[in-house]
Amino acid sequence: MISVENVDLTFETNDGPVHALREVSLEVKEGDFVSFIGPSGCGKTTLLRVIAALESPTTGNVSVNNMVPDDARKAREYGYVFQAAGLYPWRTVSGNIKLPLEIMGYSSAEKEERTKKVIELVELKGFEKKFPWQLSGGMQQRASIARALAFDANILLMDEPFGALDEIVRDRLNGELLNLWARTKKTICFVTHSIPEAVFLSTKIVVMSPRPGRITDVIESSLPAKRDLNIRDSSEFIKIAQRVREGLKAGHLDEDL
Amino acid sequence: MNAYLILFFLVWIGGWWINIRLSHVEQSRFTKVLIPALFGLVVLFMWELIVIGLEVNPVLLPAPTAIIVKFSNSLSILWIDFVQTLIKGALSGYVLGCGAAFLTAVAIDKFDFLKRGLLPLGNFVSALPIVGMAPIFVMWFGFDWESKCAIVVVMVFFPMLVNCVQGLELVDHSRQDLMKTYNASYTETLLKLRLPSAMPFIFNGLKICSTLALIGAIVAEFFGSPIKGMGFRISSEVGRFALDMVWAEIFVAALAGCLFYGLIAFIERRITFWHPSHQK
Amino acid sequence: MKNFLGNSNIIPISVIVFFIVAFWYLAAIPMNSEKVSRQFKNLTFKEHVDKSWNLKKPKLPTPHQIVNEIIKTTFYKKINSKRSLVYHGWITLKATLAGFILGTILGILLALGIVHNRAMDFSVMPWVIASQTVPILAIAPMIIVVMNSVGVTGLLPKAIISMYLSFFPVVVGMVKGLRSPDQMQLDQMKTWSATQNQTLWRLRFPSSLPYLFASLKVGIAASLIGAIVGELPSGAISGLGARMLAGTYYGQTVMIWSALFAAAILAATLVFLISFLQNYTLKKMAIVR
């Protein structure tokens, strides 16, 4: 599905070169739920953006659905969800969801049908005609996710979508996201800096560290595919969380400079 | 000390006292209009009383009542002047100038080099006394409204251009990235994201330019005009010391300015209803 | 936006200015051709172009003609001669500065009143805002003539016009600025039992400086325009506005343009000075780094 081979990315900034990604290699299989976790500057967002063809690696190869990322972008193979919902305040909720559909040239009937389907999926029924600023943060994010699901991309790239929400809302949305994943069977790449979130959601956890940005551990989760929030108290969960924590600490110790 | 002056002070103190009381009451939309209206009325009263009480020469400062009388007697002249200056001169220049600026902003949007060069120049030109070009335009376009229209075009072009370019630039980065993930074309991104997003700036420019257009058209006429037009009337009536007519013209100008600005603000509220500044 | 020197935009700006000048020279040819044909006969193309660029009373003077005129009337005339651009520029500048300083002081005072007094806020502020939509400059001739008739001539009437043109932007800007500290900072002051005065000097006033400087730039440009327009009614004897008008009466187009350029240079210098002051002050206060 997604294959990252030896990717290196250095940014030229005013304060000198920043080594954002160093020798990053990764395989994501179809139907995986992969979390990228690490502190600020570890390159997790940069890696997601490379996969999305919003950044270009300095060296290395990336293939998405057997295409170069930019071709995958042109073929609209993935949906992207940003941390800030980024909904257009001048469009209603359904107007926002229709935005990608308009650009991709779907017919009116299809637009209506898909919008309806996806609004039900994220449980925003009844809010179609509301404007984003009339919704709570959690609802705005749900609309943003709906927008990413509206067209037929089987990959979902999510950059800390729940980072701006409080923990209670976040727990609820985590549960809803897992349900969605089970129903739609998409491949999801999810960036977060919350350890419980990463462990709860994923089938595979990629631990990253900064300076330079690199992968310090890849954990195949032993948790069952069907889970609920109670699983966070199980010993298996705690073990995996500990392993993540170790990976983060290790990365912290061998930073260069 | 005559009765009028005593009344003057009474009205002043009384009016001020009422406004102080009103200001400390819980505010509603009604009070927000009432207090400044009351203030304005009190000022008018005081003006009237002082002119009568101190027996001010009406040639220097006419009383409000005299102005109102002159206004109602001169409606046809005022209307002709209004059409000449504000409709033919200011409005045409405004539409042409702002339209051209908007189109230019969209045209140079793709060319960073042009933007980096024109934007500082635009800011520079906006601070210059463009009205001074009035005599030059009269020489090129004649005495009539065309030269006034030209002045207005030059006056409004650069402030509007700067605002439009800024508005098109200041688009949320993640929203632009989102458009990239949809593989949207330049035109689609422009129409669906950047133009709606730029509306607050575009309207800010339109509002600023509305006053500039009015000033430009009127002041340009000080430099030469056929025998009609608000600027012409003001300078000629001033020469004849018929100040009540001058004040009547100024009143028309002030009214036109407020209404025009208000109209633009009204349209702005409908189109940019989503902007945080319009929400409580 | 206004740091001309050491700015990466110098190249695009220079290129555009170059093209503007080139276009100007090209435009002068068709625009002046009627006058050239009337005055001279049987010219070659090159001679025609040369004459277009050097007419005595051209329809469109060329940059070098204007620059020459400016140099001639600036450096080669006695400073207090009636033909010196410096003399006229100084007359206009005096009125501009006087009006600007008065307008700024009064504007700040009114802003302080509005921010600290509810009755003033509700009564006066709506009128100040409304006045921004009114073409106030239309009153200029009246002010000049009325004041002249009671014996007040020269600098003061023009300064009064400049004053009320800079007054309103300063009021609006200062009110915004004095109100700019957020509720958190105001609450902090309350917990220290600060008096209104202390809050004013230590919090509100420093926070208002960026807004004040922005208004000062608008104000000084407006003051200059006010002074120039104020020179028109009184028979146009001295000042840059007067010179522009005199140019129209005598058909001396180069004189008009040179006065216009002088006014533009004056405006640019004044705004630049305020920008400079702004950067210096704000850097010292570490609002800008």
Image (cartoon, coloured by chain):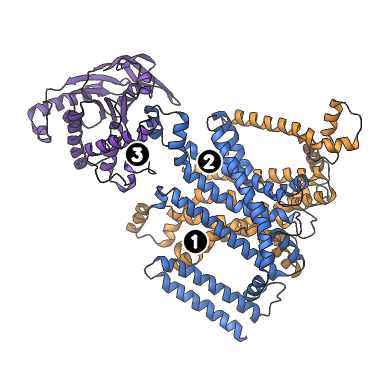
Chain colours: A purple, B blue, C orange
CB contact under 8 Å: marks 3 and 2: no
Circle 2 Cα neighbour tier, 10 Å, few/some/many (<14 / 14–19 / ≥20): many
Residue at 44% across, 32% down: B188
Kind of residue sitting beneath label 1: Leu
Which corner quadrant holds the C terminus of chain B? bottom left
Does the rendering let one see residue A37? Answer: no
Query: Residue B22, position in %: x, y?
Result: 42, 72
Q: Which mark's residue is nearer the viewer, 2 or 1?
A: 2
Q: Looking at the image, which is closer to me, A88 or B134?
A: A88
Residue holding disc 3:
A96
Of all chains, the one bearing label 3 is A
- Residue C112 numbered tag: 1
**Circle 3 — which element?**
helix
Say what amino acid the circle numbered 2 marks.
Answer: Cys
The quadrant in which the N terminus of chain B is found is bottom right
Residue B267 falls left or right of residue A40: right
Q: Which mark is residue B164?
A: 2
